[in-house]
Image (cartoon, rainbow, N blue to C red):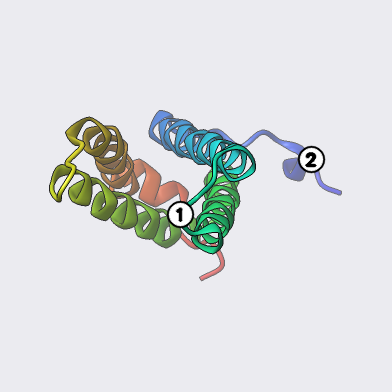
Amino acid sequence: MTETSNARVPRHPSQLLLVIALSVEAAALIAATIFLIFEVLVAPADSFTSAIALTIVSGIAAVWVVAIAVGVWRSQAWTRGASLVVQVLLAAVAIGSFQGVLPRPDIGWILLIPAIVVTVLIFSKPVQAALARKDV
């Protein structure tokens, strides 16, 4: 084992901010999943099957965003595309929260602002350099 393999990899503050933002998104998804589990167990749903499906999808999304945050921390190139897909989906849900029969602009902004921040960070030069493929 060489000495350089044990050396700490310096991370740009933008990369650290991206990890923090993704971690906050992951924590929110974990909290939502826990809430949905509680709701399935306590409150009767109109459609039990839909409630279970939503809970499972929320749990899978939480695990996926945790994996992306860990990947960004480890400077893995695949995380840029995965992060961008998650942010586009968040923006779509946020836009849906601004309109409809029962609009909730507060929820829309809570979803849209982090999605914009993460998207800007993904396309920043320091993050692009940190997450660039190194095997080419």
Mark number, residue 46: 1
Circle 2: residue type: Glu
The residue lying at 29 percent from left, 47 percent from top is 119
56 over 7 or under it: above or below: below
Secondary structure found at label 2: loop
The residue lying at 29 percent from left, 32 percent from top is 110
Q: Which residue is mark 2?
A: 3
Q: Position of residue 44 (x, y in %)?
A: 54, 45
Residue depth check, mark 2 versus mark 1: number of the one nearer the observer = 1
Identify which residue, 30 or 7, lies in the foreground. 30
Circle 1: residue type: Asp
Q: Position of residue 100 (x, y in %)?
A: 14, 51
Q: Position of residue 104 (x, y in %)?
A: 21, 36
Q: Is residue 69 left or right of residue 116?
A: right
115 over 80 or under it: above or below: above
Q: Given the current orientation, which residue lies at the most extreme right position?
A: 1
